[in-house]
Image (cartoon, rainbow, N blue to C red):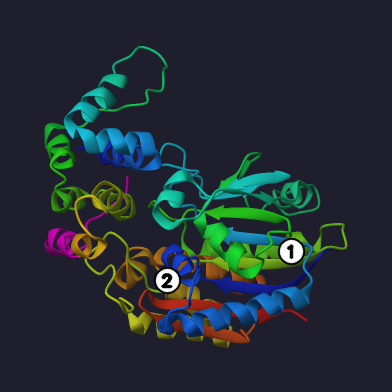
Amino acid sequence: MAEIVGVLGVTHNPLMWASLRETVPPDLAHVAANFDRLRSHVAGLRPDVIVLVASDHFHMFMMSNMPAFLIGKAPRMRAGHPNESRGFGLETTMVLGDPGLGAHLLGGPDLAPVFDFSFSDEPWIDHSFLVPLLLLTPDLDIPVVPVFSNCNAPPIPVAARFAALGSYLAEAIATFPSAQRVLLVGSGHLAHELGGPRQFLGVSPDPGFDEKAVSWMAEGDLEGAVAGTGFGRLTEAGNESYQFLNFITCLAATGGRQATMAEGTPTRFGNLPFFSWDMT
Amino acid sequence: MSRYMVNKLLWDVDRSDEALTRFKEDPAVFLDDWESLAERPFPPYPDGGHLTDTERAAVESRDYGALYAMGVNPFLLWQFARSVSVPDELGIDGLITSFREAVAPHGYPDFYT
């Protein structure tokens, strides 16, 4: 059966990514070092496939057609959209997929029907997927099963559903008849705001939230994380903080383990999340 | 109030370079075209949409405070603002400052659609 060999949670901030492309500025040195460390960690885990939980930012899905949770199952997929190329210098590329695992995760006779996912045979991922991939696996040589969660267009699924998603993915991966080594990655933010009064403050819009959020992961406190991330509390932390919920999926997939790496690295973009769980 | 339609308009402008160029050239002409698309009998799912007079005026004059107060999605609003203004009209720092001044009085409006 397939096996989850590691679980990671990282930022996908495209401005950060753009800033790391050339000489690393001093305030991002620690961020660059964290990505170096995680890149080596991923190489050591030798994953055959990456299941990546992230939130499309109105590139593939608009409010005309907004799934709560969707799995992409295509052998190859486009990555990067024209306005991301214009805005961030993120060029469109192709990423390998894994339709077999994708189809399995959608459910089947051996899996309890916990989730009614939407699916796509032609996913087109955006920076929320591509930035973590470029930073963790720069050669883009490992197939990816994208799991889209709606964290940008309210109503957003409640935190308990993100936890249920994590438990489900862990069970579903463990029942996939293959010898694949699976890396589960979640991407999101700590306290973060865009398009509101507290955007681009140069510091986190809610350091108190960040501290708590990091401690939930460090302590493996799934219950605390779910209880502490209602829509209202996340909005107080910043109007883009909903993407923290993807890390709750990661934590739940580990069964509530203590993270071996849990930090909110201070930068001009706020505190950037770095989480890693050992699964062996 | 058609919060969704405003979101759709902002998204239509930002997602293609061609639409962005046309909007920047003349917002009124762009909006006339966009609204007229919704009048066509076919295709049945029109590419354009209808805005109220207040919404249209806010988009045309790029009144970010008014759009934010209406409950436009903040992410879409910021992407739109950045794409139409930077770098031709304002540097990014100038836009950040003026945008903050425009939206701050309105706190955190509900932006459900």
Residue beneath the point at 64% across and 78% down: A38
Q: What quarter of the picture does the N terminus of chain A occupy?
A: bottom right
Is B106 magenta? The answer is yes
For the residue pair A84 and A212, the one nearer the viewer reads as A84
Among numbered discs 2 and 1, the one appearing first in the sequence:
1
Locate residue A215, reporting x and y percent.
49, 86
Q: Secondary structure at mark 2?
A: loop
Tell me which chain the residue with mark 2 is part of.
Answer: A
The answer to whether marks 2 and 1 sit on the same chain is yes
Q: State the extent of the magenta-drawn residues as a range.
A: B97-113
Looking at the picture, which amino acid does disc 2 mark? Thr
Q: Residues within 10 Å of mark 1 (few under 14, many from 20)?
A: some
Locate residue A207, reporting x and y percent.
34, 83
- Dividing the picture into quarters, in which one does residue A78 lie? top right
Looking at the picture, which amino acid does disc 1 mark? Glu
Mark linked to residue A171: 1
Q: What quarter of the picture does the C terminus of chain A occupy?
A: bottom right
Mark linked to residue A229: 2
